[in-house]
Amino acid sequence: MPARRCCVFAPGRVNVIGEHTDYNQGLALPFAITDGITVRASTNEHEPDGSRCVEAIARELGESDRFALENPEPTTGWRAFVRGAVAELQDAGFPLVGAKLEISGRLAQGAGLSSSAALTVALCMALLDLVSSEERRGELSIDRIALARICSKIENDWAGAQTGLLDQIASLCGASDTALRIDFQSLEVTPVPLQLEGWHFAIADSGDRHVHASSGYNERRAECTRACEILGIASLREARLDRLDELPEPLQRRARHVLEENDRVQTTVAALDEQRLDVVGEQLSASHESLRDLYQVSTPAVEAAVDRLTRAGASGARLIGGGFGGSVLGLFEPDVPLPPDTLEVAPGPGAHVLAR
Ligand code: GLA
């Protein structure tokens, strides 16, 4: 096959509302942001002995990796995602070729903007583009939800974080001016126009970094599984508020958060439809209180960031992502200036091939 090149961009995401609902088959409302990870890829020659290898370079970190295409060994850090992408795509039946992958991007790791999903999505799309047929180049040879599942498996099995599908679907399916209502039971993705009428979403970094594989994230997920076992249901989507007192603490609090958070997603979608941005702000703050008090995934630095945004006039503010650090999202009325330590975020397109 002649040498090939491509360049793929995959965005991070902000979740407007619906936190810790994805792995409970609930609802969420994320959007893809305009910042993300870029992977430049080119096919590699065979080695002198006929074997094929993958070389990867992480530009910002000044680090690299090199491994046999046929046999990626597990490892840690960013390299785990590269090796996982190569292994899982081949496992799913895609015949990959030796490749050189150059990773760059502006998403802070562990800041709750889903840097790891953006990395995984960009890697997978680049590897697939290198082997797509000439007529179909630029088109994805796999359904986006199916690819989201592969990307999530890489995070689960290669990076050790038992995360759900929120970040990968947001990165793959995002669109400008649009949030995505995702139903994690049916995996139906419904575009929700974000007509902000001059209101602004902005994020503030709490400064606390998380690693989901070692934070309380996996523990929360295990607690939800336990709650389902006790209630005799397949997922918390099927739980009813009037049966939650059958659960011991802290499982009762965890389940209550999930059920009420699903309701808040519905309320937020309706409020956006009616252009009631004030109601959206109230829902953000209610979500944060629940994440702090019921799901217990906040930290003092996150609380300080929420306070900062609230004092600066945010109509609502909450932690986004898995918690235990990361970023805080605030919603600001048109005439309220954004505080200096915040970054305005707006929905941008989902992952795509930029160039060849
Ligand atoms: C992280 C995970 C997602 C989701 C959120 C919490 O971002 O990667 O799958 O569970 O936390 O909503």
Image (spheres, grey):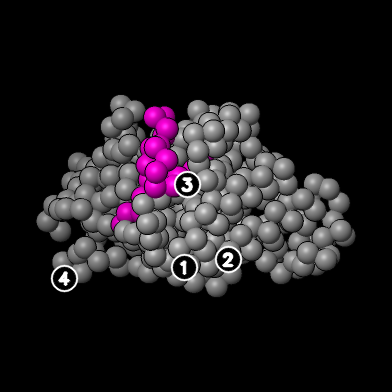
- Judge: label 4 CB < 8 Å from ligand 1: no
Query: In this rendering, does residue 187 appear at all?
Result: yes
Residue 3 in the image: x percent, y percent?
13, 52
Of marks 3 and 4, the one in the foreground: 3
Task: Name the element at disc 3.
Answer: strand
Label 2 SS: helix
Instruction: Say whether marks 4 and 1 touch (CB < 8 Å).
Output: no
Type of amino acid under label 4: Glu
CA–CA distance in space, label 4 to label 2: 42 Å
- Give amino acid for label 2: Gln
Relative to 292, is 182 on the left or the right?
left
Q: Which residue is mark 2?
A: 266
- Callout 1–callout 2 Cβ contact below 8 Å: no
Residue 14 % position (x, y): 45, 49
Location of the N terminus (image quadrant): bottom left
**Extreme front residue here?**
335
Residue under circle 3? 331
Residue drawn at x 71%, y 69% is 238
Q: Amino acid at mark 1?
A: Asp
